[in-house]
């Protein structure tokens, strides 16, 4: 019998933010696979949930190199999907673990079209970085009838300049891609005191930045998320 | 010593979607409090996590009547905050449980200003209804550089009409407030086949609606969330 394929969101960094369902699956699954961006590099997702992985579970890192070449990316997805398919066809259940939530900008969703047609798939949602930042700071992401916009920073930040007119609150993912323009957007819109950047949220290396001058000095790491509240934080 | 106040997000309905951290807190806390909208009514949040609540934990329902009168609402928050304060001042730790995520349109955040000034507060994030719907359907909420807008339905739906122009994907909460206008927005924007409404997600009473004609016939319950993907679901 063909095995079952799971996508598990294991949250932003604190192993306490993994769900019961994901813990149960990790304890008894046949294979756990995790994406890595370089050969032999650590998997943050794996570090988060390693305590929950059963003794007899096999763990495999799959290489997903970053690239702007769509054909290269597709080749990798196919190659990694073939690896997973082989395990499934041999009757193994396989869990693909993903940082944060699998529906929120994850590699897992790019893999699915190559896998889901002929097999059983179950996706388990996870805690997003932005929900954990709001919780950490004891602030609402949205209250009353407020609106929230979530988007990645893209070079130039034109998407953010448009969104900020129409939404009460904004979440910016991948701030490291163009910090300079994020700073400009904050200045143009008089948002001093109305934003917070948190990097590596809920981990030991967490950093919280709350002013534009601090942000200018800060070397923004890959896992950094900004929350902007146009109405400020003291509601 | 004054006790600690916790806000726990216990997810959309499936008890497997509660996090390890919330489970640990529920097993050993002194008091669990949960908001209810009517006297003697059930608490869905309590049903979800009742298996995790320790034997010696006291459980209290706090009445939060729905009202458009801001003064009445404020009176209730103060009254309920007083109840919690008394427990905390007697050295008890208290966990306020909330459906979904505490930062996402929750009563918990309205209570905080009345409690946080003089005591220790810790908020634990939870799985949102919209993350669980995307997982259920094995679809991304956002892929690549896509943007997501999240907002509640308000009478007339003017907020949605504006947002739909500027965002790739939209999440509409509280669809029951004005289903007629939600239907109109879908028709005006040719969104047949590009939306899904899920009510009571991950519970036994779950319903999934994928066409405008079905939606017209459907009596939308309180816990209903819609995901709209302007690009459709087959990416």
Image: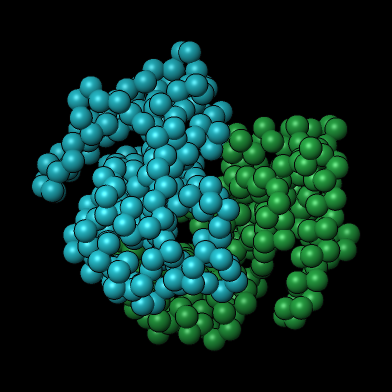
Chain colours: A cyan, B green
Q: Residue at x 22, y 62 (%)?
A: A181
Which quadrant holds the N terminus of chain A? top left
Percent position of residue B105, x then y: 59, 63
Pinpoint residue A93: horizontal percent, then vertical percent. Answer: 43, 26
Q: Is residue B187 left or right of residue A67?
A: right
Q: Nearer the viewer, residue A158 or A213?
A: A213
> Could you say which quadrant of the image residue B95 lies in?
top right
Q: At 41% across and 61% down in the image, what residue appears?
A: A195
Whole-percent x, y for residue B227 in the image: 46, 64
**In which quadrant of the rendered view does residue A40 lie?**
top left
Depth check, front residue: B23 or B80:
B80
In this picture, residue B152 sits left or right of residue A13: right
Please state the horizontal and vertical placement of residue A120, each as a whole percent of the image.
Answer: 43, 38
Q: Is residue B62 left or right of residue A107?
A: right
Residue located at (54% from left, 86% from top):
B156
Outermost residue to the right: B40
- The answer to whether one can see residue A121 in this image is no
Tell me the residue at 75%/81% (across/down). Answer: B69
Placement of A120 over or under B198, stated as above or below: above
Q: Quick one: quadrant of the C terminus of chain A?
A: bottom right
Kindly tell me whether residue B24 is visible in this rendering: yes
């Amino acid at each position: 019998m063909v095995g079952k394929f799971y996508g598990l969101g294991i949250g932003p960094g604190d192993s306490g933010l993994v769900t019961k369902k994901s813990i149960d699956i990790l304890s008894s699954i046949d294979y756990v696979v995790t994406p890595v961006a370089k050969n032999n590099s650590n998997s943050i997702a794996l570090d988060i949930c390693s305590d929950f992985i059963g003794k007899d579970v096999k763990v495999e890192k799959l290489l997903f190199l970053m690239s702007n070449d769509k054909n290269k990316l597709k080749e990798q997805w196919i190659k990694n999907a073939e690896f997973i398919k082989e395990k499934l066809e041999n009757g193994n259940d396989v869990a693909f673990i993903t940082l944060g939530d699998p529906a929120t900008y994850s590699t897992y969703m790019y893999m699915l079209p190559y896998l889901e047609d002929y097999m059983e798939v179950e996706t388990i949602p996870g805690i997003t970085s932005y929900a954990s930042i709001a919780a950490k700071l004891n602030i609402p992401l949205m209250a009353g009838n407020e609106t929230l916009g979530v988007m990645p920073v893209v070079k130039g930040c034109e998407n953010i300049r448009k969104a900020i007119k129409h939404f009460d609150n904004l979440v910016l993912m991948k701030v490291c891609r163009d910090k300079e323009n994020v700073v400009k957007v904050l200045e143009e819109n008089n948002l001093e005191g109305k934003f917070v950047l948190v990097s590596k949220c809920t981990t030991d290396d967490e950093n919280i930045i709350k002013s534009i001058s601090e942000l200018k000095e800060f070397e923004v790491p890959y896992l950094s998320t900004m929350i902007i509240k146009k109405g400020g934080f003291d509601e």
